[in-house]
Amino acid sequence: MGKSRMKAVAAICTATLLLGGCGEAPYELTQSEESLIVNYAAHVVAKFNVKQKDGITYVDPSKLQPQEETETELAEETPQDTSTETADGAQNAGEGGQPQENAEQTGKTLQDLFGTDGLSVSYTGYDVNASYVEEDYYSLNAPAGSTYVILNVNVTNNTNQDITLDNLSKKPSFKATINGEEVPAETTILLTDFSTYQGTIAAGQSVNTVLIFKVNEETGANITDMNLEVNMNGEKIAVIL
């Protein structure tokens, strides 16, 4: 090891003489000569460094690649994550990034809101008429240019005991949207007005009740869509017909 160190010292001294000179202008090394001396010096330091595993490691310059090329290759090799995370219950995006609406209708039925296990409450269709007559003692007539959309609601007692229905105490307020126009239910004194119905339904019997909405004659003659909403206990609820 001593001989090797002497050779190393001799090499460094020789390089010093070449660079320094004696009062003469310093010798300018070519790029190849400078690289040779630097590589040799690094090799000597690495060879005799007892802690080489924690220090410098010699690397052959011919095996190095330009930094720009290495960064480009890394960018090409790194896969791009194009997956889209979807949280549970969130709406999936459709074409153009627009959320797709749920096709299922939401809301509650009249049975959900007013029925019981033994009492069935169901919507049975609608009529359009300029007047509504209850028995022989009361009639409701629409003003000129208007007509009534009359929703029929059937209430049936499916038990062998009488059942009392008291919608008046619930104070429901109905509103229909007919052909895009919002229309409140008419306030009437009809005994069969569903929104204010109070009565006892005998065992196994049915009662036909109504909800009446006033619209113009043109709308009444061509109903393309209709939705019902009830406001009850401060909550607005869509009614599934």
Image: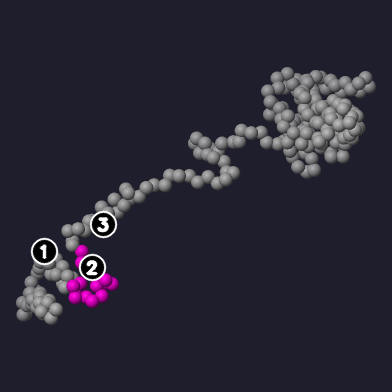
Q: Give the residue at x 19% y 75%.
A: 48
Q: Secondary structure at mark 2?
A: loop
> Gap in Å between the C-alphas at discs 3 and 1?
22 Å
- What amino acid type is highlighted by mark number 1? Ser
Q: Which residues are magenta?
A: 45-59
Q: CA distance from mark 2 to mark 3?
A: 19 Å
Q: Which residue is mark 3?
A: 67
48 or 136: nearer the eye?
Answer: 48
Q: Earlier in the sequence, mark 2 or mark 1?
A: 1
Residue 176 in view of the camera: yes
> Residue 120 falls in which quadrant of the image?
top right
Report the residue marked by disc 2: 57
The residue at which mark 1 appears reads as 32
Count residues near mark 2 (Cα–Cα under 10 Å), then give few for <14, some for 14-19, many for 20+: few
The amino acid pointed to by label 3 is: Gln
Q: Are marks 2 and 1 in contact (CB under 8 Å)?
A: no
Q: Main secondary structure of the magenta part?
A: loop
Question: Is residue 33 shown left or right of residue 140?
Answer: left
Element marked by disc 3: helix
Q: Of tags 2 and 3, which is closer to the observer? A: 2
Determine if residue 209 is in view.
Answer: no
Classify residue 185 by image quadrant.
top right
Residue 54 is one of the magenta-drawn residues: yes
Residue 226 lies in the magenta-colored region = no
Label 1 SS: helix
The percent coordinates of residue 160 (x first, y second) are 89, 31
Q: Please name the residue shown 88% across and 36% down the image.
A: 166
The image quadrant where one finds the C terminus is top right
Image coordinates of residue 156 in percent, x first then y, are 84, 28
